[in-house]
Image (spheres, rainbow, N blue to C red):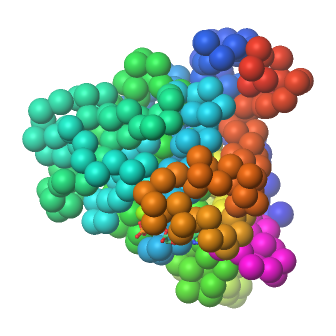
């Protein structure tokens, strides 16, 4: 691997855990962050968009589902992952941030909700907690966007809305939520990418098709560039950062086609004080990869190739979380406006979802099973 996951953190020096204790927790008092998240905290903060105030600790755990392309299963994954996490005993808030095509509520059979994200972001009638509606899964609430004018929400995110949304997400930790999950829209708009940059773990979802894989790489590239820009800004070196970003966008003289990790390594030689932390923002967050609608081993293997490319070409701390097979359980349950996880708990696709959830949580430092040490088998890993 050209730019190992921990290399950037090594360049930065390990961040301090902010005095956060990481004792084993029981179901009643599951507490975040974990050791791993606390150690990543400084690098994670560097990649946050400028509108985001810096939290002292990484709570709640923020997950984002993106992927660049429409119709690849982002909402199906978001809805069922949120439900799976809630079934494991975590309190989860899922936010529908697909301004142009919000339909997360449909996965839960909710045709109307008393309040929605627009009431918070556009009308300023409520805080984020006030627009959450309980779902049919205990422990899981949804902030829907269903009745809103997409552009109004999008406009509000361009002005003060982004910062308010960020404060709202963090305040959900104080309301007892362990996880906030962001279901993002298709494409690489600034808001979508910046929301992805806000997550401790962002999941890129792709179908095993050339167009989808291509868009997933474009999505990763855009995230990479935004993280570089955010970290330069947070270091107070925005103009020097712009020069570094420009160099990253050009070939190295005499060595065309080099990876971003190669370019970062070269730029580090002349400007370690800026390039080191900028690269560190890449390893401050998990880049999860999911392949959806697989039909063959070749389809499944695409995720592994994407993981390698994300690590070695971009320098992300990336992990292939797993795959979901093409399964009629997916569209059958959606047609009935019911959750696949509840309707077809024994199906292969639900088993795959559960496995991917475990990998994701492990990447975030949360372990399961008899050795996890907690009463419900949910605990935290010590490094
Ligand atoms: N593994 C699967 N097997 C069969 N059908 C699937 C699978 N995953 C998703 N689908 C179907 O694909 C369609 C699109 O899924 P979904 O709405 O989750 O995509 P999306 O990425 O959120 O789309 P958008 O970008 O429009 O928000 C749905 O009709 C869903 O039933
Ligand atoms: Mg969707």
Residue 330 in the image: above or below residue 141: below
Name the chief secondary structure element in magenta: helix
Tell which of 383 and 115 is nearer to you.
115
Q: Is residue 298 magenta?
A: yes
Q: Which residues are magenta?
A: 293-313
Residue at 83%, 23% (x, y): give it. 372
Tell which of 259 and 307 is nearer to you.
307
Q: Quadrant of residue 369?
A: top right
Residue at 62%, 41% (x, y): give it. 84
* Location of residue 167 in the rendering, given as x and y in whole percent from the top left corner: 33, 31
* Location of residue 147 in the rendering, given as x and y in whole percent from the top left corner: 19, 54
Residue at 66%, 31% (x, y): give it. 88
* Location of residue 65 in the rendering, given as x and y in whole percent from the top left corner: 51, 55
User: Is residue 11 something one can see in this rendering?
Assistant: no
Residue 55 horizontal side relative to residue 355, left or right = left
Residue at 38%, 45% (x, y): give it. 95
User: Is residue 337 something one can see in this rendering?
Assistant: yes
Residue 247 in the image: above or below residue 349: below
Q: Quadrant of residue 304?
A: bottom right
Q: Is residue 199 magenta?
A: no
Residue 121 in the image: above or below residue 340: above
Q: Quadrant of the N terminus?
A: bottom right
Q: Quadrant of the C terminus?
A: top right
Residue 284 in the image: above or below residue 264: above
* Location of residue 101 in the rendering, given as x and y in whole percent from the top left corner: 31, 65
């Amino acid at each position: 691997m050209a730019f190992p996951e921990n290399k950037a953190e090594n360049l930065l020096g390990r961040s301090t855990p902010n005095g956060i204790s990481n004792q084993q927790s029981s179901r009643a008092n599951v507490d975040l962050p974990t050791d791993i998240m606390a150690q990543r905290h400084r690098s994670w903060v560097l990649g946050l968009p400028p509108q985001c105030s810096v939290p002292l600790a990484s709570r709640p755990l923020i997950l984002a589902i993106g992927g660049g392309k429409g119709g690849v299963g982002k909402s199906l994954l978001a809805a069922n992952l949120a439900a799976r996490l809630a079934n494991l005993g975590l309190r989860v808030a899922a936010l529908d941030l697909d301004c142009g095509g919000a339909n997360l509520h449909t996965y839960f059979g909710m045709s109307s909700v008393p309040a929605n994200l627009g009431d918070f972001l556009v009308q300023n009638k409520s805080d984020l907690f006030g627009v959450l509606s309980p779902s049919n899964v205990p422990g899981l609430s949804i902030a829907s966007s269903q009745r809103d004018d997409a552009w109004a929400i999008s406009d509000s995110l361009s002005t003060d809305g982004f910062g308010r949304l960020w404060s709202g997400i963090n305040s959900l930790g104080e309301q007892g939520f362990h996880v906030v999950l962001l279901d993002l829209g298709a494409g690489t708009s600034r808001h979508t990418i910046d929301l992805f940059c806000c997550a401790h773990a962002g999941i890129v979802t792709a179908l095993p098709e050339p167009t989808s894989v291509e868009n997933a790489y474009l999505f990763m590239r855009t995230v990479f560039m935004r993280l570089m820009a955010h970290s330069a800004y947070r270091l107070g070196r925005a103009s020097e950062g712009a020069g570094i970003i420009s160099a990253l966008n050009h070939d190295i003289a005499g060595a065309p086609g080099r990876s971003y990790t190669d370019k970062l390594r070269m730029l580090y030689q002349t400007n370690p004080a800026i390039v080191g932390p900028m690269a560190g923002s890449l390893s401050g967050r998990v880049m999860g990869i999911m392949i959806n609608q697989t039909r063959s081993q070749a389809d499944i293997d695409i995720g592994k190739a994407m993981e390698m490319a994300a690590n070695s070409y971009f320098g992300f701390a990336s992990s292939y979380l797993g795959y979901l097979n093409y399964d009629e359980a997916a569209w059958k349950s959606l047609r009935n406006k019911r959750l696949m996880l509840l309707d077809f708990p024994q199906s292969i696709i639900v088993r795959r979802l559960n496995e991917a959830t475990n990998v994701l949580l492990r990447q975030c430092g949360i372990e399961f099973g008899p050795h996890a040490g907690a009463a419900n088998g949910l605990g935290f890993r010590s490094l």
